[in-house]
Image (cartoon, rainbow, N blue to C red):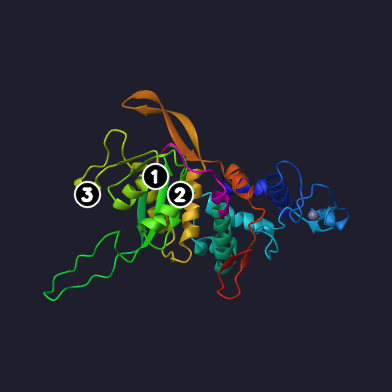
Amino acid sequence: MKLTDFQMVFPDDEACLAFLEETVWPKGRFCPECGCVDTIAMKGKAAERRLYHCRGCRGQFTATSQTWLHSRKLPLVKYFEIIYYDANSSFGMASTRIAEWTGVSQKSVWKILTAFRQLQGFWLSVREKLSNVVELDGKYVGGKPRKTKDQDGKPVKHKRGKGTKKQPVFIAVERDGEARATVVPDDTHDTIQAIVAAQIDASAHLMSDEDQVYAKIGKSFAAHSSVCHGASEFARDDVHNNTAECFNSWIEHMRDVHFFVSKQHMQRYVNDVMTRWNLRVTVEKQVTRKGERVRKVTRERMPLLDKLRVIFGHAVGCNVRRDRKTGGVAII
Ligand SMILES: [Zn+2]
């Protein structure tokens, strides 16, 4: 979507609020405080702010009450502009760049994007469990250690991935379906087992590499197949975990945009990647292959407004505030 088109759809705060009302209350307006549907629109100056009165708890509310957009200092249209730059790009955008383009300070942009990423995690937490064929894999996010030499002056070869100080991320991807990625404190059986039980249905057919952790977990599922990456076996007929490996590369792309991602905030950045992966639509295209026109089915990015509708649809209850102790983001 072009920026000019986006600005035409959202020229002012009222247009943004109207869009939020559509997405937050698709089945009709309700009070976020008590859930009461007996509400009336207020008149006069309050009508300009699209303020409503609840007859149940006698409180007042708007479409942003009890959401991450509640009690903000910047105009709503500025929030939408910042989200436009982030959500409309392939792998997000650095807060420093958006700050330059929107005239908002980098700190504020970072906080808004962090809250938006938190909301994306909230949206993903209410999704159904993965089923059918589910591929498992681990990703280790972090840079290489500095080059060092041993006593003989030869460069020390460092380990890659497992067993290093990098941050482990556990990945489960349903083939032709959604993905789940969780930043985990360690990659031991007990940690992974608890996540797998919460995210994957017991009827699923698991596929993974030769890691013993997955072999043990696979016993409590309908089926488990594995390929041996150590022996250069990456696919055996339908058995492979290449979809999960593909998702891994998306996380690697994230690091191209955000040069430094701290362990503390990594889950939020991973939420962003997950949303991009999960919110894709199947598109059928006519392409030329070896001089012939053939049909090709691909998955492409969901149109921006549809994507925002899905994410904002779960905004009620995800109230994000600044944490006064750490200066980070707290969820209420
Ligand atoms: Zn109420």
The label shown at residue 230 is 3
Classify mark 3 as within 8 Å of ligand 1 or not, answering yes or no.
no
Q: Quadrant of residue 98?
A: bottom right
Question: Farthest residue in the right direction?
Answer: 44
Instruction: Where is residue 82? Give x, y as percent.
Output: 59, 57
Q: Is residue 164 magenta?
A: no
Q: From mark 3 to mark 2, how far is it between C-alphas?
A: 27 Å
Q: Which residues are magenta?
A: 122-135
The label shown at residue 220 is 1
Question: Farthest residue in the front direction?
Answer: 220
The label shown at residue 197 is 2
Instruction: Where is residue 316? Give x, y as percent.
Output: 67, 53
Q: Is label 2 or label 1 in front?
A: 1
* Quadrant assignment for the N terminus: top right
- Whether residues under marks 2 and 1 lie with C-beta atoms below 8 angstroms apart, the answer is yes
Q: From mark 2 to mark 1, how far is it between C-alphas?
A: 9 Å
The tally of labels here is: 3
What's the residue at 31%, 47% (across, down)? Answer: 215
Q: Amino acid at mark 2?
A: Ala
Residue 90 visible within the image: no
Residue 28 visible within the image: yes
**First in residue order: circle 3 vs circle 2:** 2
Q: Residues within 10 Å of mark 3 (few under 14, many from 20)?
A: few
